[in-house]
Structures are given as C-alpha cells and as structure tokens.
Amino acid sequence: MTTQVQLARVPTRRALTVFSPPGVSVDTARYPFLTAGVLASTEPSEYLSIHDHPESWKGLDRETVAAMRRGLYRFVMPINGRDMDPSDAVETLQTIALSVSPVAMEVQVESLPGRQLQSQPGQLPTGPNVMVESIELLSQPEVSKVAEKITRKDIPASEGVCQLLEYDYTLDQVARIMAVGLLGRLHSRRFVPMRGAYKAVIDAFINYTLMQLVEKSESGLHQIWVGNLYGDSFTVLSIPGEPRVDYLRSEAYAGVRSVGYSLEDPRHATTDPKTSIFADYARFAVYAHLARQKETSHVIVLHESRSAANQALGPWIVRAGVQDALDSTPVTLDNKLDVGLVVNSILGPDMKAALCESPLLSKVGLSIEQSATFPTARV
C-alpha cells in the first residue's frame, strides 16, 4: 500500500522596497503585544512627505486625501510593547518616528492585498494591514536633532510633549514619537497604541495651556467664526468666561439624525465614545487658538455633518474644520443676545434642535429659536 504524504505549503516571502512619508502604525493586539510598523507606499512619489502630514492638506479635496491614505499600507509585525522587543525592529521604528523626511526600507512580505481605504478607530484611515517578518532601512533618515535631544531626557512624558509642541512639532508628529516609546521616564517607556498616544498628547497640551492661561485676562468679546470642510459646517462661539471648550455634534444621513455632546463639566458626562474623541480634537484646535491669543474665554464648537463619506476621515476632520473656522474673520458682537440672533440665522434646523436638546443653552444663557425636532439617535 502506498502512503501519500501531503506537505504543507511554506509561504513564499519576497523582499519589497517601500517608502514611508515617514509614518508609523501601532495598534492594540493582546497586551503586552501590539502590531506595530510603518505606514508606507509601494511607489515613490515627490509628494509622499504630505501623505501622513495633515497640516499640509489645506486646499486638498476629500478624494485627494482619501487617495493618499489609501496608498499607505500598514506594514506591521508583533512587538512586545512592554519589553520593547525585538530590539532591532523597535530601534528602526523609533528612527522612522524621529525622521523629518521620507524613508526607503525593505520589508519581507508574502503578498499584498488590493488597495482599499480602511477606517481606523479614532485615527485617519489607511490602506490594509500587511504582516511582515522584518523592516530594514535602505536610506539614511534625516532625524530631527531637536526631537532626538528632547527624547533623550529623563522627564515625564507630558513635559516632553509640551517641549516638542513649543518647537512647532505637529500633533501628529508628537503622537508618532509617543507611540513608539520615546517619551516619558527612561525606566518606564513603553509602546502605546496610536489612538492612546493622540489622547495623551492632547491631554498634556490642554493641561499645560490651562496653566499658562491662569493669569491671563478674560476676553470681553462675543465672537462667532464659521468654517466648512467637505460639507461639514463648524460654528465656533466665544463668550467671556473662564477657559473652557464645549463640543456639540449633529449628524444627519438618510433622514436619521444622531446627536452627541461633550462638556467640560463633570456634572454632564459625554454622551458617547465617538463624541469624546471628536471633542478632544476640537479642544486641541481651540486651546491652541486661546494660547496664541493669550486671553481666556468660554468656547462652544457646533459641528454639523451631512456627509456620510466624511466619517471615514475620523476625528481629523473636526480638528481641521475647527481650524478652518478660526482662520476666518470672526463676527464680533456686543452681547449674548446678539450672539443668539446671529446663531439663529446661521444654524440649520437639525443643529438648532440639537442645541436646544443639550444642556448648553441653560449654561450660557443663549436664546435660540426652538426648531421642529426629528427622530434622534444618540450614539
């Protein structure tokens, strides 16, 4: 009798040259293990440096942004975030995170999936995940000397964050550095999922800014800014008061409206996780504005979205939309009554209804016309 032996197919891997803007990806797996690696394109491009640099996207349409992000695969491998192992991969990712110019590298892959945009919870979308065996640098990255010096300091992570931001490193750059374990006390550094890194950087910046605003004077102005990004509208109200930023969003797609709010008031819990993340990005933009103005005020961000396609861009659209509004020329008014009159003329019925249903009106004393209400889902 003939015995047939079936051999399991051994995956064939090949070396592939890829190009990073630079960018990194760190996601939760099963702690202490994470999937970490690089955001990279399989094709070189003279514009590659802006693919993971949202500060450079002003003026680009949504389809262009989506195409850039779709071309960035996440070439990742298992990393022990607590033990920072394997050390060679950790060192490579840290070098990429500190780089200020595109980086060429070689990865060992079995195959590449088709390019498609995949949403990332609390982050910008990217192309698909691709598991690799190794990531090796082919070009010598241009490492930021200032960032390198700060990351060598044995100081709390929050202090390192604020020092980097003071040197005009962007939120995305600092979050990248935080995610690969380059900030914090030397003995306690760990890899952090990218979503958590953004949260930590934003919180550190807001706390630092609040301390800087303690002795600043209160603005006596009532102002309104209006911005629009890819069809999402942003109305930013500023009234005299202590530094505080409240966020309210209203989404309406296919006849269904969802509403959420996040108030800087412990008596009112944020309605849902998505609103909490979006509010963090709105607060980052507003507190950066208050720091530049060196005055305190109570700011309310009203975000109305009617485009389901914008949801793929995650909380970035909130940060960029609020910034777009704050870059415009504000309407300056004499009192809250005038603010209420102007807001009534600006807001659509969905946002008016959302505002009237929230605790905001009673807290700031604005008079808003009650609109007809529609079926509302709080998500």
Image: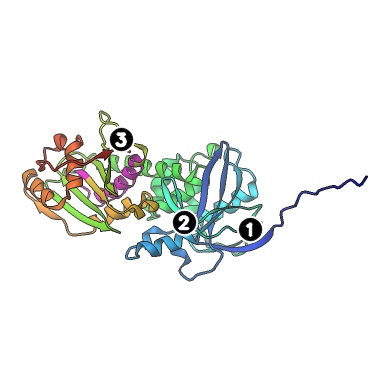
In the image, residue 330 lies at what x, y percent? 16, 56
Helix, strand or loop at disc 2?
loop
Inspect the magenta stretch and tell me whether residue 299 lies in it: yes
Point out the image quarter for the N terminus: top right
Q: Residue at x 60, y 59 (%)?
A: 112
Helix, strand or loop at disc 3?
loop
Point out the image quarter for the C terminus: top left
* Distance from Cα at disc 2 to Cα at disc 1: 18 Å
Q: Which residue is mark 1?
A: 111
Q: Which residue is mark 2?
A: 117
**Rendered image: mark on residue 271:** 3
**Residue span colored magenta:** 275-300
Would residue 190 appear left or right of 124 to someone viewing this image? Answer: right
Q: Amino acid at mark 2?
A: Leu
Helix, strand or loop at disc 1?
loop
Q: In the displayed structure, would residue 88 be above or below residue 139?
A: above
How packed is label 1: few (under 14 Cα within 10 Å), some, or many (20 or more)? some
In the image, residue 142 lies at what x, y percent? 52, 62
Q: Residue at x 30, y 47 (%)?
A: 282
Q: Residue furthest bottom?
A: 46
Q: Main secondary structure of the magenta part?
A: helix
Q: Nearer the viewer, residue 171 or 135?
A: 135
Q: Nearer the viewer, residue 17 or 304?
A: 304
**Rendered image: mark on residue 147:** none
Q: Residue furthest front?
A: 1
Q: Amino acid at mark 1?
A: Ser
Q: In the displayed structure, would residue 163 be above or below residue 227?
A: above
